[in-house]
């Protein structure tokens, strides 16, 4: 049985992501409407299960294989050894507070896709979305051993 070519899958997923974005410019970086929003210069929040489902439809790759490829290439943060990658967090979109199922996605995945396959020269800025300050310690556990989110990715909602 041949080993999966994760890098090839990543290229397929990046092309699919750009196709989704070209068909709907609100698909990226518009809190409340997008499948992923930049929370920090290094990370996007991917809204689950919409993110995996949308990429699956656009790429023809099963959602569980999408997660596997992104985790194995280090582009999707997961808790080891369980490889959990979907986390329940309280977010503020503007002043609205909501509980969401999200994943942390390395910004390289989306930013490189937009540059290489979408011809974008100016990358998305950090969106108006923040994680509730009370969940900082939980997020720090998720990011253990990795570069932590910037302080501005959190808010107490005031």
Image (cartoon, grey):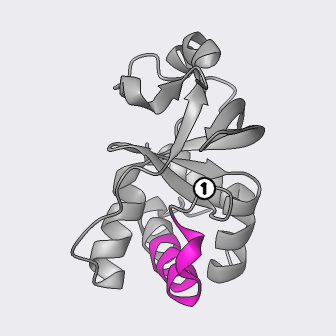
Q: In this view, does 81 lie to the left or right of 18?
A: right
Could you say which is closer to the camera, residue 72 or residue 88? Answer: 88
* Residue 33 screen position, x and y as percent: 67, 64
Q: Residue at 57% across / 74% down in the picture? A: 26
* Residue 48 screen position, x and y as percent: 73, 51
Query: Which residue in the structure is indicated by mark 1?
Result: 31
Above or below 69: residue 90: above
Q: In this view, does 43 lie to the left or right of 70?
A: left
Above or below 107: residue 141: above
How many discs appear? 1
Quadrant of image for the N terminus: bottom right
Q: For residue 74: magenta?
A: no
Q: Residue at 29% across / 65% down in the picture? A: 123
Residue 24 can be seen in this image: yes
Above or below 1: residue 38: above
Q: Residue at 73% across / 56% down in the picture? A: 64
Q: In this view, does 81 lie to the left or right of 14?
A: right
What's the magenta region? 13-28
Q: Magenta-highlighted stretch: main secondary structure?
A: helix
């Amino acid at each position: 049985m041949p080993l999966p070519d994760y890098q090839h899958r990543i290229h397929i997923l990046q092309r699919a992501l750009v196709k989704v974005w070209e068909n709907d410019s609100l698909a990226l970086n518009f809190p409340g409407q997008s499948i992923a929003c930049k929370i920090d210069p290094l990370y996007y929040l991917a809204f689950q299960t919409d993110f995996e489902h949308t990429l699956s439809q656009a790429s023809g790759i099963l959602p569980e294989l999408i997660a596997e490829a992104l985790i194995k290439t280090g582009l999707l943060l997961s808790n080891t050894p369980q490889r959990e990658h979907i986390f329940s967090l309280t977010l503020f979109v503007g002043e609205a507070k909501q509980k969401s199922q999200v994943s942390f996605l390395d910004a390289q995945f989306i930013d490189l896709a937009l540059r290489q396959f979408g011809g974008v020269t100016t990358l998305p800025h950090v969106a108006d979305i923040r994680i509730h300050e009370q969940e900082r310690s939980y997020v720090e556990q998720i990011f253990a051993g990795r570069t932590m989110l910037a302080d501005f990715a959190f808010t107490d909602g005031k």
